[in-house]
Image (cartoon, helix red, strand yellow):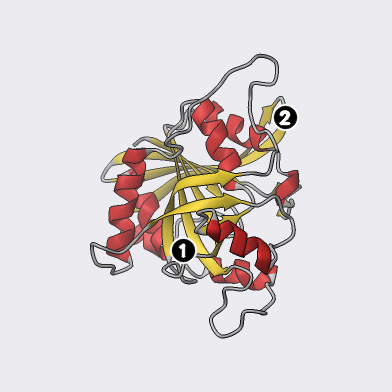
């Protein structure tokens, strides 16, 4: 792959070529911060030209919560159309999203990194490029199967899992910006949600409308409300959630290297 778009959130605040990527043979040739104009607003991107085995690659990093130089825009205020349109305009061949999620499934403990295979969106909020004429896009398989296959192999290996470890989960989209109640998490669990977050499926829908292969790498940053072992009344704190996610980035670098190889 020559051009990869990467979306980070609370689980990946910014993008640098650290030791993990250098050890995998990626070196930075050039880095530019640019602003892409779209009909839905301006989008800041970090454009990185990388070299691997004598071949140049391009990585375009987007912080989905961009907010006048800070990563602080609340999830319900993100203009996803601007973000995805900006990445599409770079000519990227695929998008890898990095997501921090609350874990519901018992086999997705904090610290584990998995993949989204399905999503459930009952928010009732439309996310589409097609507001003027009816266009119905199939999302039976919302995530690119080829990308997920490659990424699952990497995540299994880098996390030291056996071949029967589950890595694919269903993402439940919550409206935010509040975390969920214990009762809501119990209901989500009963309807098939394995993890919960506030953003990613909106991106997946738009990427599908533009025929851009999209995969979501999900960092289990915390137990969802009421699921903390031994303390079902534990409160959730945004800063501790973000901190946990940012300590689990080694598998993310491995995924990036795989897709750029």
Residue 40: image tag: 2
Q: CA distance from mark 1 to mark 2?
A: 31 Å
Badge 2: residue crowd in 10 Å (few <14, some 14–19, many ≥20): few
Quarter of the image for the N terminus: give it. Answer: top left
Q: Residue shown at 32%/39% (left/top)?
A: 146
150 on left or right of 215: left
**Residue 170 pos. (x, y %):** 48, 52
Q: Nearer the viewer, residue 250 or 163?
A: 163
Q: Nearer the viewer, residue 132 or 1?
A: 132
Which residue ends up furthest to the bottom in the rendered image? 230
Residue 249: image tag: 1
Which residue ends up furthest to the top in the rendered image? 133
Q: Residue shown at 53%/38% (left/top)?
A: 204
Asked if one can make out residue 137 in the rendered structure from this viewpoint, the answer is: yes
Q: Quadrant of residue 82?
A: top right
Disc 1 element:
loop
| Precedes in sequence: disc 1 or disc 2 | 2
Badge 1: residue crowd in 10 Å (few <14, some 14–19, many ≥20): some
184 on left or right of 96: right
Q: Quadrant of residue 53?
A: top left
**Residue 161 pos. (x, y %):** 28, 67
Quarter of the image for the C terminus: give it. Answer: top left
Which residue ends up furthest to the left in the rendered image? 163
Q: Residue shown at 65%/52% (left/top)?
A: 174
Q: Residue shown at 50%/54% (left/top)?
A: 192
Query: With respect to residue 135, does 143 lie above or below?
Result: below
Disc 2 element:
loop
Query: With respect to residue 180, does 1 lie above or below?
Result: above
**Residue 27 pos. (x, y %):** 38, 51
Query: With respect to residue 132, does 220 lie above or below?
Result: below
**Residue 135 pos. (x, y %):** 58, 18
Residue 50: image tag: none
């Amino acid at each position: 792959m020559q051009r990869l778009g990467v979306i980070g959130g609370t689980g990946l605040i910014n993008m640098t070529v650290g030791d993990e990527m250098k050890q995998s043979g990626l070196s930075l040739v050039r880095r530019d911060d640019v602003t892409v104009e779209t009909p839905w607003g301006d989008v800041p991107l970090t454009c990185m030209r990388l070299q691997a085995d004598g071949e140049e690659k391009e990585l375009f990093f987007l912080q989905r919560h961009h907010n006048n130089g800070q990563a602080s825009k609340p999830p319900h205020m993100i203009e996803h159309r601007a973000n995805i349109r900006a990445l599409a305009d770079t000519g990227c061949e695929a998008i890898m999203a990095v997501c921090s999620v609350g874990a519901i499934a018992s086999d997705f403990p904090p610290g584990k990194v998995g993949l989204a295979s399905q999503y459930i969106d009952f928010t009732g909020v439309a996310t589409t490029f097609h507001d003027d004429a009816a266009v119905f896009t199939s999302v039976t398989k919302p995530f690119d199967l080829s990308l997920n296959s490659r990424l699952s192999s990497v995540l299994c290996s880098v996390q030291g899992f056996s071949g029967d470890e589950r890595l694919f989960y269903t993402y439940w989209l919550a409206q935010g910006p509040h975390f969920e109640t214990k009762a809501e998490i119990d209901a989500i669990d009963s309807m098939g949600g394995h993890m919960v977050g506030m953003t990613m499926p909106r991106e997946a829908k738009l990427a599908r409308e533009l025929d851009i292969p999209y995969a979501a790498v999900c960092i289990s940053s915390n137990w969802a409300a009421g699921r903390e072992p031994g303390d079902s009344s534990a409160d959730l704190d945004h800063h501790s959630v973000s901190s946990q996610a940012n300590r689990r980035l080694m598998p993310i670098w491995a995924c990036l290297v795989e897709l750029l190889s």
